[in-house]
């Protein structure tokens, strides 16, 4: 779902929870946001600076993003990490989605199925953060993607951002042009752009904890050189790799606006 940079920077007080219809964008900076999406709504690929949890209360949709592609329905939960991008295509029934904070204790899965979504909804009315903790601590059955070739390519690019697209296409018996068109249709972005985005995400996550010099880390992650990594990381986070390694704090909403809806 989409939270614009201007909304992220806003300091105005907001209610703890609300229900809104499109086209008002969904935000992840509020303690809880409940939104209703009309039938066949499409949200093109976009990026969130802030991580958050989405619980599908009713209806369903397909989400395709940096963690994969998933068909979601009532009871599904999606754990969106900071700076991840995704697109959303809603079913003919539309959907009602409850957004909650993303606790540090969130499980290491992208999407799953909750056993008791009603308990989460009830608790969110009183204490959204406690509801988020309940989701994070609840048993979640992981949801797997459709497994079509665009999903296999997306997984391969996440595993190896240096993967050559022509090589992959030839191995699978597909034309390069077919791969480019089909992947963009499924994920809302070209495979080259997807590869660059997941590589930048990996850099952002590894820079603070890796002991490798930045130049070596850049090569290990598949960047041409350190300057290449710096450009992509700055575009993603608004900070240089050196600042990330120093642990310089990120101000909410500090992101290159050119990448916000990419």
Image (cartoon, rainbow, N blue to C red):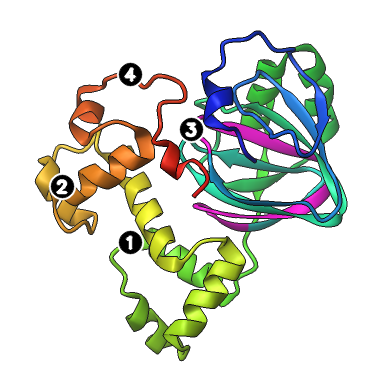
Of pointers 3 and 2, the one earlier in the residue sequence: 3
Residue placed under numbered mark 3 in the picture: 49
Of the numbered discs in the image, which one, if any, rests on residue 161? 1
Secondary structure mainly formed by the magenta segment: strand
User: Which residue lies at the image location 62% right of the left edge and 9% below the top edge?
Assistant: 12
**Mark toward the start of the polypeptide (3 vs 1):** 3
Q: Position of residue 101 (x, y in %)?
A: 61, 24
Q: Position of residue 232 (x, y in %)?
A: 29, 46
Q: Is residue 28 above or below residue 148?
A: above
Among the two numbered marks 2 and 1 on one chain, the one whose residue lies closer to the N terminus: 1
Asked if the residue at tag 1 contacts the one at tag 3, i.e. Cβ–Cβ closer than 8 Å, the answer is no
Q: Is disc 2 placed on a helix, strand or loop?
A: helix
Question: Which circle marks residue 249 in the picture?
Answer: 4
Question: Mark 1 packing: few (<14 Cα in 10 Å), some, or many (20+)?
Answer: many
Q: Earlier in the sequence, mark 3 or mark 4?
A: 3
Q: CA distance from mark 4 to mark 2?
A: 22 Å
Label 3 or label 1, whichever lies nearer to me, is: 3
Nearest the eye: 241 or 112: 241
Question: Would residue 143 be counted in the magenta stretch?
Answer: no
CA separation, marks 3 and 2? 23 Å
Disc 3 to disc 4, how far (Cα)?
13 Å
Q: For residue 22, which quarter of the picture?
A: top right
Binning the other alpha carbons within 10 Å of mark 4 as few (below 14), some (14 to 19) or many (20 upward) gives: few
Residue 221 visible to the viewer: yes
- Residues at discs 3 and 4 in contact (Cβ within 8 Å): no
* x and y percentages locating residue 200 in the rendered image: 33, 48
- In the image, the segment drawn in magenta is 48-69
Query: Which is closer to the viewer, label 4 or label 2?
Result: 2
Q: Which residue is mark 2?
A: 227
- The outermost residue toward the right is 93
């Amino acid at each position: 779902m989409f939270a614009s940079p201007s909304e992220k920077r806003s300091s105005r007080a907001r209610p703890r929870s609300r229900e809104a219809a499109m086209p008002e964008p969904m935000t992840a900076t509020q303690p809880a946001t409940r939104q209703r999406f009309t039938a066949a709504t499409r949200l093109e690929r976009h990026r969130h600076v802030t991580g958050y949890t989405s619980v599908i209360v009713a209806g369903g949709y397909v989400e395709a993003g940096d963690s994969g592609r998933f068909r979601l329905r009532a009871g599904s939960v999606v754990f969106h990490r900071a700076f991840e991008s995704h697109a959303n295509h809603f079913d003919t029934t539309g959907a009602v989605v409850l957004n909650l904070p993303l606790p540090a204790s969130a499980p290491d899965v992208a999407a799953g199925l909750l056993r008791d979504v009603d308990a989460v909804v009830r608790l969110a009315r009183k204490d959204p953060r406690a509801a988020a903790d309940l989701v994070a601590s609840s048993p979640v059955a992981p949801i797997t993607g459709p497994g079509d070739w665009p999903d296999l390519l997306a997984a391969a690019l996440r595993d190896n951002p240096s993967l050559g697209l022509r090589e992959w296409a030839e191995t699978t018996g597909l034309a390069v042009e077919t791969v480019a068109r089909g992947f963009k249709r499924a994920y809302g972005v070209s495979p080259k752009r997807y590869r660059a985005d997941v590589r930048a995400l990996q850099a952002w996550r590894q820079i603070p904890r890796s002991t490798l010099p930045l130049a070596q880390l850049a090569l290990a992650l598949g960047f041409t050189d350190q300057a290449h990594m710096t450009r992509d990381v700055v575009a993603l986070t608004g900070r240089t790799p050196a600042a990330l390694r120093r642990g310089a704090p990120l101000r909410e909403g500090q992101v290159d606006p050119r990448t916000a809806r990419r």
